[in-house]
Amino acid sequence: MINRSKKTDSKKVISKRNIIGGNPLTEGSLCREITTLRGQTDTIWKVEFHPSLPLLASASEDNTVKVRQLSEDRLSVTDVDTLYGHTGDVFSIAFHATLPILASSSFDKKVKLWLISSVPIRCVTTLEEHDETVHSIAFHPSDSLLATCSDDGVIKLWRIFPDNSYSATCIETLKTDPYEIFYIAFHPTMPIFATAHGLAHVKLWHLSPEDTSSKCIATLEGHTRGVECVQFHKNGNLLATASDDKTVKLWRLSDDLSSASCIATLEGHTDCVTDVKFHPTGPFLATSSSDRTLKIWRLLKDNSSAICIDTLKGHTSYNHSVAFDSTGKILASGSSDSTVKLWDCYKLSTEYRRRFDLTHGSLATSLIGKITESPAVLTHQSYMRSLLQQSIGNVLKINTQASRTNADTIKAEKYLELEHHQVQPIIDVDKSEDIAKSHGGGRSRKKYKNKISRKNIL
């Protein structure tokens, strides 16, 4: 039963005026903060968008889940409901792609299924077979299957029965390391899922044809501290992992999906990397960190590495989660400052790709040559503006605002160098950013010393 002793927040609408009037774009930035969502009173551990509907959920240390709805144009946000029922921190949430179900997991060792087809949203099932904190949950992308993982190294697979009031039965229990499993994620198309472990590795699992059993097929090692998150790329052959060792690693899956090899290590954060998410349509990924920043990375054309193209600052405490909406135009982030922030990524998904995604090597090569031949009668800024417009025309429409041209030109030069001259990738374009000093501690859960026994890997 849901504990309704706490009064659910009344609906409130964040106006278009507030969103459009957010912080202005700084010179060269690709994303901007558009609004701050409040209403939960403690750390936001997880933010999650619905795979297709304009719904956003956030899980908090205050034991609640808040559900919000975005307008069709993504320019306004409305509070839908606040879900009460857990008696401990809510660490993870997940929407099913086709069923009207939201799942949540908690420090109270329980998993709850919520029916989101009507308001108020109500709990329809509570799963209580884990013996320790349930850190992460994930729905199968097409089946009525739920995977959960917990502090004691246990994975459980649950079959959900939509025709029976969304009841669920545990169909398999897997015991791995006797330490925390922090994240679980399914492959988008193949019968594979991955788990991120506190012992600094990732495991790949293969599901049986009937999705009734699974076996470990590979262990990926390379991180030096606990792995906080694992994500599959939409094309299925790329994997990203985020770790307390301050890095993100990219892994390429073998053709038979039986193993994976590390192809790149992305450095730039100065504290634990707590989450990583791929952009749903473009060659980008976003990361969150305890250093209080978010970073946007651009994958190379062959997905062999990535460069940092933007660093987002706005939260005043550790960041724990990041998520793109289904259009890729909105990014959400959750933090220990008790807020969810929404970021406008429209420029990232449209203007940036159109401007820098060159497909003709000869054009790029000739462009680089002309960049070094700037005539003295023109300023560098005006020359670059006219040159890019003349050379690329309608293929790459350049924003000619003088305040941004120079920064955009520098990013273009770096990108062209990287893609067509194979120079060493530039890990972070912005060398002048003032990032907070390292604070250490996996998931920044220092206050949980007495709750969670965590073994750091040195």
Image (cartoon, rainbow, N blue to C red):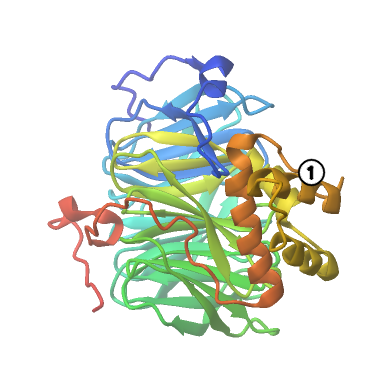
Q: Is residue 97 above or below residue 441?
A: above
> In the image, 126: left or right of 442?
right
Q: Most extreme residue toward the left, as rendered?
A: 450
- The percent coordinates of residue 335 (x first, y second) are 35, 42
Estimate how packed mark 1 is, as few (under 14), some (14 to 19) or many (20 or more) residues with alpha carbons within 10 Å.
some
| Residue type, numbered disc 1 | Lys
Q: Residue at x 22, y 72 (%)?
A: 455
Q: Most extreme residue toward the front, as rendered?
A: 377
Q: Is residue 371 above or below residue 376?
A: below
Residue 93 visible in rendering:
no
- The percent coordinates of residue 283 (x first, y second) are 66, 59
- The percent coordinates of residue 422 (x first, y second) are 65, 77
Residue 409 visible in rendering:
yes
336 vs 175, nearest the viewer: 336
Q: Which residue is mark 1?
A: 397
- The percent coordinates of residue 215 (x first, y second) are 53, 80
Q: Is residue 84 above or below residue 298?
A: above
Q: Which quadrant is the C terminus positioned in?
A: bottom left
90 vs 281, nearest the viewer: 281
> In the image, 239: left or right of 183?
right
117 vs 269, nearest the viewer: 269
Residue 63 lies in what quarter of the image?
A: top left
Q: Residue at x 61, y 85 (%)?
A: 258
Q: Residue at x 46, y 25 (%)?
A: 81
Residue 445 lies in what quarter of the image?
A: bottom left
Q: Secondary structure at mark 1?
A: loop
Q: Is residue 208 above or below residue 65?
A: below
Q: Residue at x 73, y 65 (%)?
A: 368
> In the image, 249: left or right of 179?
right
284 vs 144, nearest the viewer: 284
Q: Which quadrant is the N terminus positioned in?
A: top left
